[in-house]
Amino acid sequence: MQIDKMNGKVLLANGKIVDPVGEKIFDADILIENGMIVRLEKGITPKNDMEIVNLNGQMVSPGFVDLHVHFREPGFEDKETIASGCRAALAGGFTKVCCMPNTDPPIDTQESVRFIYRKAEGQIVDVYPIAAITKNRKGEELTEMVELSSAGAVGFSDDGDPLVNAQIMRYALEYSKIVDKPIINHAEDPALKADGYMNEGIVSTQLGIPGNPSIAEEIMIYRDLTLARFTNSRLHIPHVSTKVAVALIRQAKADGVRVTAEATPHHFSLTDEYMRSFDANGKVSPPLRSEADRLALIEGIKDGTIDAIATDHAPHQYDTKETSLDLASYGMIGLESAFGLSMTNLVHAGHISFMDLIKLLTIKPARAMNLPLPGIKVGEEANLTIVDPDEWWVFSRKDIYSRSQNTPFIGRELTGRVKSVFAKSCYVRLQD
Amino acid sequence: MNLSIKHLYGLEGVPKEDLTQIFDTAFSFREVLERPIKRVPTLQGKTIVNLFFENSTRTRISFELAEKRLSADTVNFSASGSSLSKGESLKDTIQNLYAMKMDAIVMRHPVPGSAKLLSQFVNAVIINAGDGTHEHPTQALLDIMSLKEKFGKIEGLNVAIVGDIRHSRVALSNIFGLKALGANVALCGPPTFIPYGVESLGVKIMYNLDEALQFADAVNLLRIQRERQGKGLIPSLREYRNLYGMTRERLENLKKPLTILHPGPINRGVEIDSDVADGDYSIILHQVLNGVAVRMAVLFLLVGGK
């Protein structure tokens, strides 16, 4: 990764501009001055005062948006910091991320929201904190949502821990209407999940591993949708993983419930078959599901039930994964591999178009969390992710910029790669 | 002749030829066990560590005895799972032991997949002595060996496994081994004890014990762990005994011979009554003897000859 500060005039020549709003792709050169797009047209004449980058026909998208990352700061800086997380985001083409509040202490006060912004100052990536729904993430008393919102929280979640008490969930949905920001609940009924740490199904039965059934997720999603319908509040459903969950969300959307939903690359790329390896890198929450669930999730991505691809980037040090499955931490990193996995398993697999994928990585997540998203137009800030949709590569440890390397995708062949990023007047080249 | 497997993590995927060779070898070791001097020099100079992270008496003693009968040097390590959960990791423990030059590791651990996990850390031969609710391959081998001794062959034999299949490593290993050798397997127990989608392994499911006994040439009665009652899986041990307990009355009503196995330790008066456990149809003590022989065979075939 090479970062060059380019404050003056920069000419990004010979790009193909991908406009997810107008849904078109067109050839143009981009002239940037002081970080702003000043000209966008074919055949801009290079001048001596310009730094010139030849894109050679690569695709230029608005910077990607990830609604779900864990940057672990404060409290778990051995796993990730905001600085290292931002490098991982850049490596994946993400210029805007929402970070979850399951830190220590959790992000449940104005001061802790401001802490995230302070730590992210000077980063090329914009980091938007999601604040806790309840004080100390205990599921008991609501946080000061209005104050947290005015400090810059973009949504509310006790992520990692479900909000078990339906009454508190109802109050959270109702109260959040003042700020009209989404409630994000990690949907897993703890009694049904019990001591399960992989999907309950034929594979868990064959491996003798305690199962965490799909019904644990579906029942809580149904509850949350019902509450959102009743209260007419905004609900965002993270890491949807089951067939029935997709169907429930599809129906709720058809009925006008104000719900958005995200899917992770690992849930549409892997199934519980992976656990035959007993590799703790496959231990995630919710768990990797069956092939039928995976295919239903892809259907949900195709028909718009799923609004966003989000990574649930969850860094853990290797020693917490090189252990017996019960003790191993939940989660995997995801920022660096997300675009390659999405291109390979959604676009090149023939499920969605390249334009659809760009929408799932840019305007649709930005809308779900009301984030600003500069378009590729004259007068807008240059916030760009440049990709080669057809490059074949093998994901390896050297592609990882996170402080942690917990991913089952090492060695995976991918087609489609992020090449560079331009944001905050910096040109970031990801490979040599 | 060598086995195709290099470790014994479980019986899933172990080819029929390997199983047959293990049994042939085990029957020849049975003869050794009948001799006045019950010791052969086969594993002289080999060092085997018995790592038990879960309480076990009979499996540990059976392995230890098998190792001693083969003249191996043995070391025992026992620790409860909880002492490892904090502080020293499984990896550190294993690597420390391995640094002292072990040829083989026999491990009992409360978590599925732990035996396989070891192979990431060390180069020794690994023998799974039970990993949580996953597999307990040597128990299934001794069960199947005992059936082979009784019936001559396994192919076409009807075997019912009764009890808490969902939480049983013995059941899972038996299913894999019996199916590989061509037996017909039925699982019997209350529906809360039957794991999701287990039919996918090619077994029948029966909720009625008398139906299962009609089907079976042999029945393997699993130990009912008393703590299951408190978790709501069964209402009471009393009702369990009424529905699934092996009693003299059931045997008498059956009007056909039946062979009864039990992996032990027995809950007398729950899954099996005393007079049945100690009666003519029971081959429970044969199983124990065969346990030593089959473990000798596994150790000899995997650790010896190198």
Image: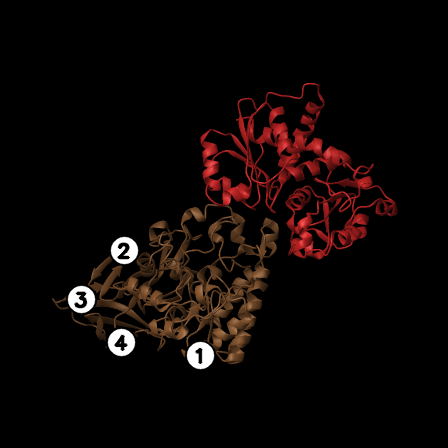
Chain colours: A brown, B red
First-in-chain label (2 vs 3): 2
Label 1: few (<14), some or many (≥20) within 10 Å?
A: some
**Which residue is pictured at 48% across the width and 77% down the height?**
A174
Residue A16 lies, with reference to residue B172, above or below; the image says below
Of residues A139 and B261, the one nearer the viewer is: A139
Q: Tell me where residue A27 sits by quadrant.
A: bottom left
Label 4: few (<14), some or many (≥20) within 10 Å?
A: some
Chain letter of disc 4?
A
Q: Amino acid at mark 3?
A: Asn
Tag 3 and tag 4 share a subunit = yes
Residue B120 visible in the snapshot: no
Of residues A109 and B150, the one nearer the viewer is: A109
Which residue is disc 1 drawn over? A177
Of residues A297 and B55, the one nearer the viewer is: B55
Q: Which mark is residue A1?
A: 2
Horizontal and vertical percent position of residue A405: 39, 51
Q: CA distance from mark 4 to mark 2?
A: 27 Å
First-in-chain label (3 vs 4): 3
